[in-house]
Amino acid sequence: MYMGDHIVISIGLAAIVAKITKQPFVTVALLFLFANLVDFDHLLNYHLDDGTANSMQIHPLHRYAPYIASGFLLVGLCWKKWRTELWIASLAFSTHILLDSLSAVMDYRIPLLLSTSVVTTSLSCYVVHRLFQDKSTRDRLLAFMLSSLILCDLELIVTVYVLKMIPQTNLFFWVIPPTLLLFLSGLFWMCFRERDAVSGAFTQLENV
Ligand SMILES: [Zn+2]
């Protein structure tokens, strides 16, 4: 699955998890966003990755994902202080892998991936719209989600279709996405940390 979709779904799922676990939304969302850094492993085998190869087979962190997710669970079991965060990180990591598996099942066919993107974006926006009662926060969050999606998709279109970069010859092709993810995660934290701590807008989620 493409990065923009991972970011949008991360926010939607984080809202649900924050509501269930009663943890601060920004912390949960950042754990979900950072779990997508697993895609750094594309850098290790970028020469094999042509956009059609199965991520679950050629990238080490994706390949050994069940062990990594279980590792987070086990460490959380032993380390009580960070248990909630580690278990949420495990869930976030597993979700990323599950979504990538869905793309692999679809053979990375663009029309199917785009249709999935429409469905997952609509569902994620619906969740945010339904769960957050503070209108200003809700609108900012939706704006962040949709602009992240557009920015990431534009980056993909420019690198692949305009500049015609291919992974086999352009390491830069794989450097931009993680940089963009770190930038957007930082932007998310800057935009929403005060609202989470001060207004409590995220922690007072509407009962559904
Ligand atoms: Zn991935």
Image (tube, rainbow, N blue to C red):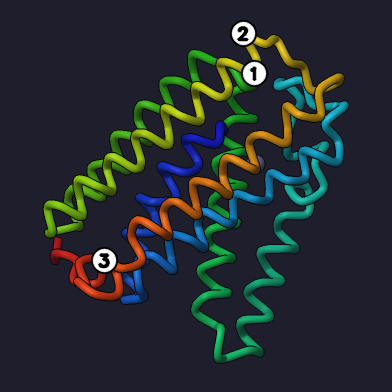
At horizontal 65% and vertical 42% (from top left) the residue drawn is 178
Q: Which residue, given by chain and number where applicable, does mark 3 sit on?
A: 195
Q: Is the CB of mark 3 within 8 Å of ligand 1?
A: no
Give percent across and percent down for residue 153. Answer: 50, 24
Give percent across and percent down for residue 106. Answer: 58, 24
Pointer 3 local density, CA inside 10 Å: few below 14, some 14–19, many at least 20: some
Q: Is residue 94 left or right of residue 4?
A: right
At horizontal 56% and vertical 66% (from top left) the residue drawn is 89
Comes first in the chain, label 2 or label 3: 2
Question: Looking at the picture, which amino acid does disc 2 mark?
Answer: Val
- The mark found on residue 162 in the picture is 2
Q: Which residue, given by chain and number where applicable, does mark 1 sit on?
A: 159
Quadrant in the rendering for residue 103: top right
CB under 8 Å between callouts 1 and 2?
Answer: yes
Q: Is the CB of mark 2 within 8 Å of ligand 1?
A: no
Question: Looking at the picture, which amino acid does disc 1 mark?
Answer: Thr
Q: Is residue 153 left or right of residue 146?
A: right
At horizontal 18% and vertical 57% (from top left) the residue drawn is 132
Relative vertical location of residue 146 with respect to residue 126 in this rendering, above or below: above
Question: Looking at the picture, which amino acid does disc 3 mark?
Answer: Arg
Quadrant in the rendering for residue 207: bottom left
Quadrant in the rendering for residue 34: bottom right
Comes first in the chain, label 1 or label 3: 1
